[in-house]
């Protein structure tokens, strides 16, 4: 009886197999779709970024430094401004006499990984706080530069004509101004008006909290450093504004402001991000330079530059005190440079293979 | 060409005028006059002093006087170094800075250009990798970090080189090395990418095809075109060297203008700050103009407007 089923079906039979007409399952339907998910500009960029080992290593280093600078100091056993009596000028991993005694008594003492400075302040937490200030300067300054530069460049590029000419001549002029010298001049002179402003007016009391030095640096960056960004964005906008979607947007009746913010700036986002990332190390560079010559943040707040400056006095006896901030600052600048290069390679449409 | 030069110079003069005005009025805004100290002088003395230095006149007149004097080479008296004039101090100190700075610029060009070219010629080989690593690293290290690392290695550990002053020839080594490290790395990077670009050009293939010697190919065809981006970097490099000298002169206690400028900031010697700022700004702006003009001259491909 079973032989009937085992027998090969006659190829010429007209009897239809019902099972072939069962509705397809979801899985089977998906298998038939030839199109893949469209890869967005961002996904594509990040996919290429992930392949760049240097950029990814830099990204990891930056994340570690960010954690060290912004999170670790809040639960670290030492404080950046507390001066521990009796533990001045300790070498790395060395303990003071009082600390050794309490250790013998069974109390665990947290080690000073990088020693202490001449006032008995723990160096490792000071370096972390210094990195915080340097990173803060870099990130906030770049954000200011990004905002001013991209808006200025977009307006000049979009409207063109006489307005563009005037705006770009101003950029040319700021470009030729020797920036560091003007920065030094502005930081020396702006300190006093800012201080008196903070003291006279309650609404400006926050100036003292942030620190006059830091605010000077931000003002100076906002005044001088956006020109490079403005030039790059303008040249991007000049070609982007000829695209069809801008004509379409115009035909649909959107105003200039909307076209600039919603269409043009969104389309040069890749360029904006790359330029901003590459601004961060240059801002950190400048801040450390200013702090090193004594113009940056004010004591007891440390910055990597001012830490190096104070360490310079004792360079022959305590060279490691100089090395730690020096290595940290180079590491931060190097990582941001490499990440910026990687981002540029990943997001620049011209380099696409 | 003449039109371009005139336009460029006019811009430079305009920029400098803005810098001078900015400097003067910013300095004017600082509260507490120059004669304020712990021992407050009597009102009569202050008035006499103010009259002597022309500080009792309205701001605009003071500004006019300052500019007129400046055009005559007089930048006013220094407040902290009694009896000395700012222009004299600059004249005395600037040659020292210029010597160290000039040496660094030369060293940067002499080392940076060959390094970049070699890296491009040996693309992908280990020489290229080493040079690229070095130049990536060099751009990330601020000059004060470089100087202190040099001091720690060569003066403290090895005790080979002196830490301060410029008394012997060997004392130039570290300041010049510290100042030129960043430009070397930057020029090497610039040179490598422009050389790679040039080597891929059609005229290089032609040069090879017509059987020119490697030497001629490199120096007559490749180098001359590849070096152009380095020319544009000359202006920023001079500015970098001048401002970098503040830090390097501080670390190595070199009696140059940079160290003088830093101490005038610390001592609040306002005429000195003003004078040095204007002097350095003028120098950098002038250098930029000169470099721009040179660039137009050496690159015939750029159409003169």
Image (cartoon, helix red, strand yellow):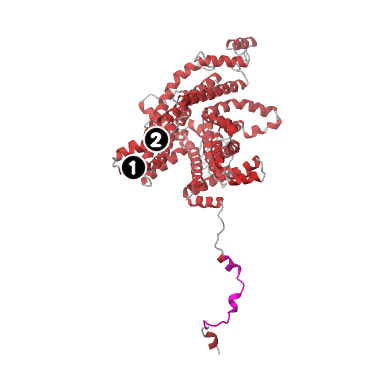
Image quadrant assignment for residue A196: top right
Q: Quadrant of the N terminus of chain A?
A: bottom right
Front in this rendered view, residue A337 or B123: B123
Disc 1 crowd, CA 10 A, few/some/many (<14, 14-19, 20+): few
Q: Position of residue B148 (x, y in %)?
A: 45, 34
Q: Nearer the viewer, mark 2 or mark 1?
A: 1
Disc 2 crowd, CA 10 A, few/some/many (<14, 14-19, 20+): some
The chain letter under disc 2 is B
Q: Position of residue A67 (x, y in %)?
A: 56, 46
Is A13 inside the magenta-drawn segment? Answer: yes
The chain letter under disc 1 is B
Front in this rendered view, residue A175 or A295: A175
Residue B206 — which label?
1
Residue drawn 57% across and 27% down?
A186
Q: Position of residue A246 (x, y in %)?
A: 61, 44
Residue B4 horizontal side relative to residue A74, left or right: left
Residue B227 — which label?
2
Q: Measured along the vertical axis of the image, is residue B104 above or below residue B201?
A: above
Cα separation between marks 2 and 1:
20 Å
Residue drawn 56% across and 52% down?
A40
Residue A94 horizontal side relative to residue B114, left or right: right
Tags 2 and 1 touching, CB below 8 Å: no
Asked if residue A126 shows in the view, the reply is: no
Is B302 inside the magenta-drawn segment? Answer: no
* SS at badge 1: helix
Residue B60 horizontal side relative to residue B244, left or right: right
**Which span of residues is magenta-colored?**
A10-30
């Amino acid at each position: 009886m079973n032989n009937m089923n085992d027998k090969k079906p006659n190829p010429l039979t007209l009897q239809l197999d019902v099972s072939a007409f069962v509705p397809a399952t979801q899985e089977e339907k998906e298998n038939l779709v030839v199109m893949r998910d469209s890869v967005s500009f961002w996904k594509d960029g990040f996919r290429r970024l992930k392949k760049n080992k240097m950029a990814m290593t830099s990204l990891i280093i930056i994340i570690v430094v960010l954690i060290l600078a912004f999170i670790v100091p809040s639960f670290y056993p030492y404080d950046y401004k507390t001066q521990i009596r009796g533990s001045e000028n300790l070498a790395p991993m060395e303990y003071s006499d009082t600390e050794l005694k309490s250790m013998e008594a069974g109390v665990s003492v947290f080690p000073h990984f990088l020693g202490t400075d001449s006032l008995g302040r723990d160096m490792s937490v000071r370096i972390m706080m210094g990195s915080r200030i340097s990173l803060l300067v870099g990130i906030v300054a770049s954000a200011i530069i990004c905002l001013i530069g991209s808006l200025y460049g977009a307006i000049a590029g979009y409207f063109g004509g006489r307005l563009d000419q005037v705006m770009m001549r101003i950029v040319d002029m700021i470009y030729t101004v020797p920036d560091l010298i003007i920065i030094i001049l502005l930081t020396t002179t702006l300190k006093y008006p800012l201080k008196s402003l903070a003291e006279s007016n309650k609404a400006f009391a926050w100036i003292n909290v942030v620190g006059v030095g830091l605010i000077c640096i931000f003002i100076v960056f906002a005044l001088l450093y956006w020109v490079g960004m403005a030039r790059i964005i303008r040249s991007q906008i000049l070609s982007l504004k000829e695209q069809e979607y801008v004509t379409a947007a115009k035909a649909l009746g959107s105003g200039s402001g909307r076209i600039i913010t919603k269409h043009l700036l969104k389309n040069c986002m890749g360029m904006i991000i790359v330029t901003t990332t590459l601004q961060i190390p240059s801002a950190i560079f400048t801040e450390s330079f200013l702090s090193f010559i004594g113009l940056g943040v004010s004591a007891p707040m440390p910055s990597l530059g001012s830490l190096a400056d104070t360490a310079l006095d004792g360079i022959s006896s305590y060279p490691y005190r100089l090395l730690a901030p020096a290595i940290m600052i180079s590491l931060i600048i190097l990582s941001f440079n490499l990440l910026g290069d990687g981002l540029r390679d990943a997001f620049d449409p011209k380099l696409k293979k | 060409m003449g039109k371009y030069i005139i336009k460029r110079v006019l811009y430079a003069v305009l920029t400098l005028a803005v810098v001078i005005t900015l400097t003067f009025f910013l300095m004017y805004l600082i509260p507490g006059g120059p004669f304020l100290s712990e021992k407050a002088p009597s009102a009569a003395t202050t008035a006499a002093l103010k009259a002597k230095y022309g500080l009792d006149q309205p701001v605009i007149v003071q500004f006019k006087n300052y500019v007129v004097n400046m055009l005559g080479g007089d930048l006013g008296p220094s407040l902290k170094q009694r009896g000395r004039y700012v222009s004299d101090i600059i004249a005395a100190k600037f040659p020292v800075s210029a010597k160290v700075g000039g040496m660094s610029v030369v060293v940067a060009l002499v080392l940076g250009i060959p390094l970049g070219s070699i890296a491009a010629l040996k693309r992908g080989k280990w020489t290229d990798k080493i040079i690229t690593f070095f130049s990536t690293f060099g751009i990330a290290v601020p000059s004060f970090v470089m100087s202190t690392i040099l001091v720690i290695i060569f003066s403290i550990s090895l005790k080979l080189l002196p830490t301060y002053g410029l008394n012997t020839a060997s004392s130039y080594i570290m300041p010049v090395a510290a100042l030129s490290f960043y430009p070397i790395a930057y020029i090497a990077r610039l040179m490598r990418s422009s050389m790679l670009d040039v080597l891929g050009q059609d005229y290089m293939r032609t040069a090879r095809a017509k059987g020119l010697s490697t030497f001629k190919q490199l120096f007559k065809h490749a180098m001359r075109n590849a070096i152009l981006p380095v020319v544009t970097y000359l202006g920023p490099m001079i500015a970098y060297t001048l401002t970098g000298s503040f830090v390097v002169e501080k670390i190595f206690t070199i009696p140059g203008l940079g160290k003088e400028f830093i101490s005038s900031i610390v001592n609040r010697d306002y005429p000195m700050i003003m004078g040095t700022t204007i002097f350095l700004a003028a120098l950098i702006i002038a250098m930029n103009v000169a470099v721009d003009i040179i660039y137009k001259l050496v690159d015939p491909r750029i159409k003169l407007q």
